[in-house]
Every structure is written in C-alpha cells, then in structure tokens.
Amino acid sequence: MPKAFRFSTAEVTIRREGRRVVIEPVEVPRDAMGWPQAFWSLAGSAPEFDLGDRRAPHERDDALAART
C-alpha cells in the first residue's frame, strides 16, 4: 500500500460499497497495560477464571517467528 494511505493500526476492515472497496482501520480500546478492554469484560463473566497478576505487561515470543 502506498505510504500516504497506510494506517497506524495493525488491523483493517475491508468492505464493498457498490463498485468501491473501503478500507478502514480497526481501533481496539486497550487498558493501561495493553490488554484489550473487551477481554476483561468477558473474563469477569466466569468467576472461576484466574486473572493473575496484571501489574506487569504481558510478554511472549512472536508466535509466527521461526523457531531454531
């Protein structure tokens, strides 16, 4: 995509409007630690779900990175 048309988000939605194709950025509301807010509203619906320690940001290896 040309630089002038790039988005600052990692995800976009694509839909048709007649003969046009519309691409829009997807903005996901996140808490101060970077977790999607929708996750926490779902997590509260299962009382037995252990939320764990949320003081530190979640870190993990890139799931798509090549393993050596």
Image (spheres, rainbow, N blue to C red):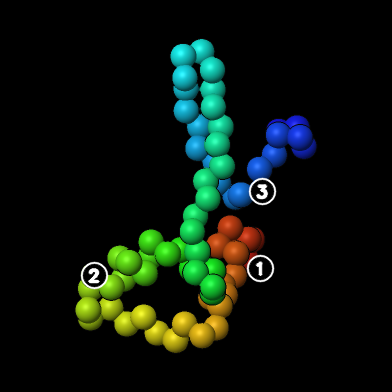
Q: CA distance from mark 1 to mark 2?
A: 39 Å
Q: Nearer the viewer, mark 1 or mark 2?
A: 2
The reply to whether dot 1 and dot 2 touch (C-beta < 8 Å) is: no
* Residue occupying the point 28% across, 78% down: 49
* Amino acid marked by disc 2: Ser
- Quadrant of res 63: bottom right
Q: Give above or below for 27 relative to 43.
A: above
| Residue 17 location (% of width, % of height) | 47, 19
Q: Is residue 63 left or right of residue 4?
A: left
Q: Give above or below for 53 relative to 14.
A: below
Residue marked by disc 3:
8
* Amino acid marked by disc 3: Ser
Q: Is residue 28 left or right of residue 52?
A: right
Whichever of labels 3 and 2 marks the residue nearer the N terminus, that label is 3
* Residue occupying the point 54% across, 27% down: 22
Whichever of labels 1 and 2 marks the residue nearer the N terminus, that label is 2
Crowd band around label 3 with a 10 angstrom C-alpha radius: few (<14), some (14–19), many (20+): few
Residue marked by disc 2:
45
